[in-house]
Image: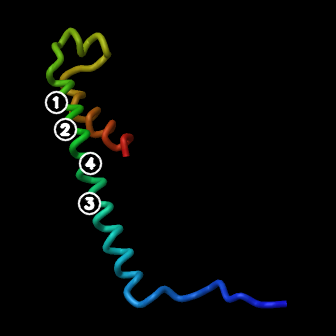
């Protein structure tokens, strides 16, 4: 019966590259969430008070809702 070794160490520098890629991935995700939040906030602020009332929102809730929706987009 042949034995195959399946546990190898990562090549030199692979872990560092992986961590750097993860940092940039996190930064990109944070930027994307910020863009979504600002777009949502801009769209909601363009609505009239009556339109906001129709969907059950007040002007004071717009910022919190935009941030919350951006987190769910990711």
Question: At 36% across and 41% down in the image, what residue appears?
Answer: 73
Q: Quadrant of the N terminus?
A: bottom right
Q: Evaluate if marks 4 and 2 touch, with contact meaning CB atoms under 8 Å apart.
A: no
- State which quadrant residue 7 falls in: bottom right
N-terminal of the two: label 1 or label 3? 3
N-terminal of the two: label 4 or label 2? 4
Q: Evaluate if marks 3 and 2 touch, with contact meaning CB atoms under 8 Å apart.
A: no
How packed mark 1 is, by other alpha carbons closer than 10 Å (few <14, some 14-19, many 20 or more), is: some
Question: At 40% across and 82% down in the image, what residue appears?
Answer: 14
- For marks 3 and 4, give the CA distance: 9 Å
Which of the labelled discs sits on residue 42, or is there none?
1
- For marks 1 and 3, give the CA distance: 23 Å
N-terminal of the two: label 3 or label 4? 3
Which of the labelled discs sits on residue 38, or is there none?
2
Q: Which residue is mark 3?
A: 27
Of discs 4 and 2, which sits in the foreground? Answer: 4
Question: At 76% across and 90% down in the image, what residue appears?
Answer: 3
- Is 30 left, or right, of 16 in this rendering? left
Q: Position of residue 67 (x, y in %)?
A: 27, 39
Which of the labelled discs sits on residue 32, or is there none?
4
| Up/down of 26 relative to 72, above or below | below
Q: Evaluate if marks 2 and 1 touch, with contact meaning CB atoms under 8 Å apart.
A: yes
Question: At 26% across and 12% down in the image, what residue appears?
Answer: 53
């Amino acid at each position: 019966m042949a034995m195959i070794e399946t546990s190898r160490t990562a090549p030199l520098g692979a872990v560092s590259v992986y961590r750097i890629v993860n940092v940039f991935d996190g930064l990109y995700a944070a930027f994307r969430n910020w863009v979504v939040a600002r777009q949502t906030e801009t769209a909601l602020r363009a609505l009239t008070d009556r339109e906001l009332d129709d969907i059950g929102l007040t002007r004071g809730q717009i910022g919190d809702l935009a941030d919350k929706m951006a987190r769910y987009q990711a």
